[in-house]
Image: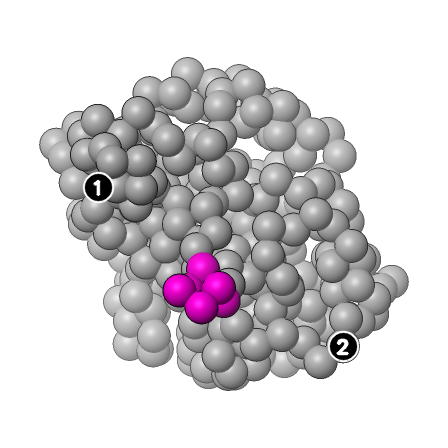
């Protein structure tokens, strides 16, 4: 049986440089991860804080045997941000495109189509493949069955499914964290750093609803899709993506590696994940074609 690869997606949250460095050192040395995405995806204003540490992190990850992918902004809004995306797309390493405007710069070179790019059918997938896509991670709301339909129609490219973490749902022109503190987006004072897993949002009735991360809306629940390798391969899916949270991501990666290698059951894997200090309850709706907030019947 072919081996399902594990990918660590980019950090969505505003973590300080020292936290980022320490996090990726552990990933490089201890995590059962094949590919690691690094870079700012959510807010270009954060880039001056993280950019200085990326060279050291890339060197450490590659020395640890990880394939490094440079992730780009999902909604570049300024000339400086668009220029930063162009510079990343000119790099010799594999690049993740999260906004379609990056395609002209990367045209003809291999890239990953991230979950912020709208790929909902085979025609969209083929459009990206013709321009260099090597891996496609479809939007998180697509089911395994729908992704499988695309994957079987496009066997020349890898398909990756978002398996773990708070789900990225939307991006806004407004910064929720700034507004909450009575600030404007341009003078936000980077208050999003206070919530390293995102800020939980409840309804007026006190129901857990969503999470916000600067300009980003995320699910409140933490997706924990725990499939068996045979089910993924039958659908043509060859990668699972884990999205960083402040929990021990080495344990998360070990759990998924054991699951995919047949050393752990789906129920056992979900139980291990449920014992971690997660920012929200486990949910696994979207991969099964159900509402994203659906909670597994058994843990």
Secondary structure beneath disc 1? loop
256 vs 138: above or below: above
User: Residue 117 vs residue 246: left or right?
Assistant: left
Q: Which residue is mark 1?
A: 76
Instruction: Examine the rendering and report whether any part of residue 117 can be seen.
Output: yes
Q: Nearer the viewer, mark 2 or mark 1?
A: 2
The quadrant holding residue 85 is top left
- The picture places residue 43, in percent across and down from the top left corner, at 31, 37
- In the image shown, does 11 or 215 lie closer to the viewer? 215
Few, some or many residues within 10 Å of mark 1 (<14, 14–19, 20+): many
Frontmost residue, 270 versus 4: 270
Q: Main secondary structure of the magenta part?
A: loop
Where residue 90 sits in the image (x, y, percent)? 29, 33
Tell me whether circle 2 and circle 1 mark residues in contact (CB < 8 Å): no
Which residue is label 2 attached to? 298
Residue extending furthest right? 263
> Residue 291, how many percent across, how many down?
48, 79
Position of the N terminus, as image quadrant, is: bottom right
**From the viewer's perspective, is residue 248 above or below residue 241?**
above
The answer to which quarter of the image holds residue 45 is: top left
Question: Which of marks 1 and 2 precedes in the sequence?
Answer: 1
Residue depicted at 32% across the width and 58% down the height: 170
| Disc 2/disc 1 C-alpha distance (Å) | 41 Å
Report the residue at 76% width, 45% height from top.
251
Left or right: 42 in relation to 275: left
- Residue 214 quadrant: top left
Number of residues whose C-alpha sits closer than 10 Å to that of mark 2, classed few (under 14), some (14–19) or many (20 or more): few
Q: Does 206 lie within the magenta span?
A: yes
Any mark on residue 32, and which? none
Specify start and end residues of the magenta stretch as a single range: 202-207
Question: At 52% across and 72% down in the image, what residue appears?
Answer: 293
């Amino acid at each position: 049986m072919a081996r399902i690869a594990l990918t660590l997606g980019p950090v969505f949250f505003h973590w300080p440089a020292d936290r980022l460095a320490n996090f990726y050192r552990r990933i490089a040395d201890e995590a059962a991860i094949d590919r690691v995405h690094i870079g700012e995806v959510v807010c270009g204003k954060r880039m001056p804080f993280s950019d200085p540490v990326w060279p050291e992190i890339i060197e450490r990850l590659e020395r640890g045997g990880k394939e490094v992918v440079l992730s780009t902004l999902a909604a570049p809004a300024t000339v400086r941000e668009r220029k930063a995306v162009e510079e990343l797309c000119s790099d010799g390493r594999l690049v993740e495109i999260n906004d379609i405007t990056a395609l002209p710069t990367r045209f003809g070179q291999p890239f990953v189509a991230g979950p912020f790019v709208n790929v909902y059918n085979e025609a969209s997938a083929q459009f990206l493949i013709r321009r260099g896509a090597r891996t496609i991670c479809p939007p998180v709301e697509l089911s395994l069955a729908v992704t499988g339909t695309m994957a079987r129609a496009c066997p020349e490219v890898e398909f990756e499914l978002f398996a773990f973490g708070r789900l990225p749902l939307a991006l806004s022109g407004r910064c929720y964290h700034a507004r909450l503190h009575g600030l404007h987006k341009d003078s936000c004072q980077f208050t999003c750093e206070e919530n390293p897993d995102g800020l939980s949002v409840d309804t007026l009735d006190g129901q857990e609803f969503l999470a916000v991360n600067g300009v980003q809306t995320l699910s409140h629940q933490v997706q924990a899709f725990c499939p068996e390798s045979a089910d993924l391969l039958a659908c043509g899916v060859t990668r699972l993506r884990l999205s960083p949270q402040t929990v021990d991501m080495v344990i998360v990666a070990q759990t998924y590696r054991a699951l995919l290698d047949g050393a752990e059951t789906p129920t056992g894997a979900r139980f291990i994940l449920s014992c971690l200090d997660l920012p929200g309850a486990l949910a696994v709706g979207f991969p099964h074609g159900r509402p994203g907030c659906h909670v597994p019947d058994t843990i």
